[in-house]
Amino acid sequence: MVKKTKAAATTSAPEAAKHSQLAGAVKDSAQQIWLAGMGAFSKAQEEGTKVFEALVKEGMTLQKKTQGMAEEKISEVTGKMSAMADTVSHKAGQNWDKLESIFEARTAKALNKLGVPTAKDVQALAERVDALAAAVAKLGKGAAPKATVKAAAKPAAKPAAKAVKAAKAKPAAAAPVAEKAPVKRARKTAAKPAAAA
């Protein structure tokens, strides 16, 4: 270390001037770098607001595009979901109709087992009663008043209902018996007023 200090002390004046020039050049260079940095900072600060505003504008346009795409997808999904809901409700309606028809068939079967006549049976019976009343009126040749015909038709309704049940079991054999019984009664009721007179 002592040798180095001696060597530094023995340096000549021209070398010292050289070192002094080098130090001044470094100092000037550092000053220029500092000023360049300050200029860059100032420029970045000025243009930074412009760049920031440009980025905000790009962000807004991007947001509008994504919102538009999202709304399209939402409307597409909504359409698909409503179509699926329509399909499901249609199938559910079909299942309810099927269930209703099964319920009606089973109810009709149970009522039939209990002997309760259906609307068709009642209608057929009413038509038969009307036909029988007309036959009675023809046989009585209009001698019996209409009230007697109606009175004769009402008691004949119960045997006729039994005849309908029997007709279901034996359709060919039961029909003539059902027609003969009310005619005989009608003859008897027509004969009673004649005998009383």
Image (cartoon, rainbow, N blue to C red):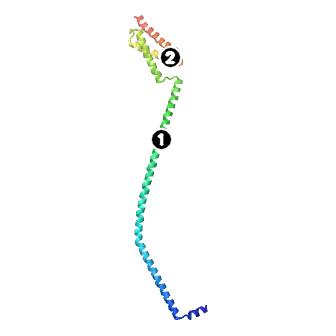
Is disc 1 in contact with disc 2, using a CB cutoff of under 8 Å? no
Q: Dot 1, how many residues are within 10 Å of its Cα: few (below 14), some (14-19), or many (20+)?
A: few
Q: Dot 2, how many residues are within 10 Å of its Cα: few (below 14), some (14-19), or many (20+)?
A: many
Q: Nearer the viewer, residue 177 or 57?
A: 57
Question: Quick check: 13 above or below 91?
Answer: below
- Name the disc covering residue 163, or none: 2
Q: Secondary structure at mark 2?
A: helix
- Name the disc covering residue 130, or none: none
Q: Nearer the viewer, residue 45 or 110?
A: 45
Q: What residue lies at 39% left-to-right and 13% top-to-bottom?
A: 147
Q: Quadrant of the N terminus?
A: bottom right
Q: Earlier in the sequence, mark 1 or mark 2?
A: 1
Residue 124 in the image: x percent, y percent?
46, 20
Residue 101 in the image: x percent, y percent?
50, 31
Question: Quick check: 101 above or below 87?
Answer: above
Q: Secondary structure at mark 1?
A: helix
Q: What residue lies at 41% left-to-right and 64% top-to-bottom?
A: 56
Residue 61 in the image: x percent, y percent?
41, 60
Q: Nearer the viewer, residue 69 or 111?
A: 69
Q: What residue lies at 43% left-to-right and 59% top-to-bottom?
A: 63
Please name which of the two marks, 1 or 2, marks the residue nearer to the observer: 1
Residue at numbered disc 1: 87
Tag 1: amino acid: Thr
Q: Quadrant of the C terminus?
A: top left
Question: Quick check: 156 above or below 35?
Answer: above
Residue 95 in the image: x percent, y percent?
50, 36
Question: Quick check: 25 above or below 194?
Answer: below
Tag 2: amino acid: Ala
Tell me how far mark 1 sits from mark 2, CA to CA: 50 Å
Q: What residue lies at 48% left-to-right and 89% top-to-bottom?
A: 21
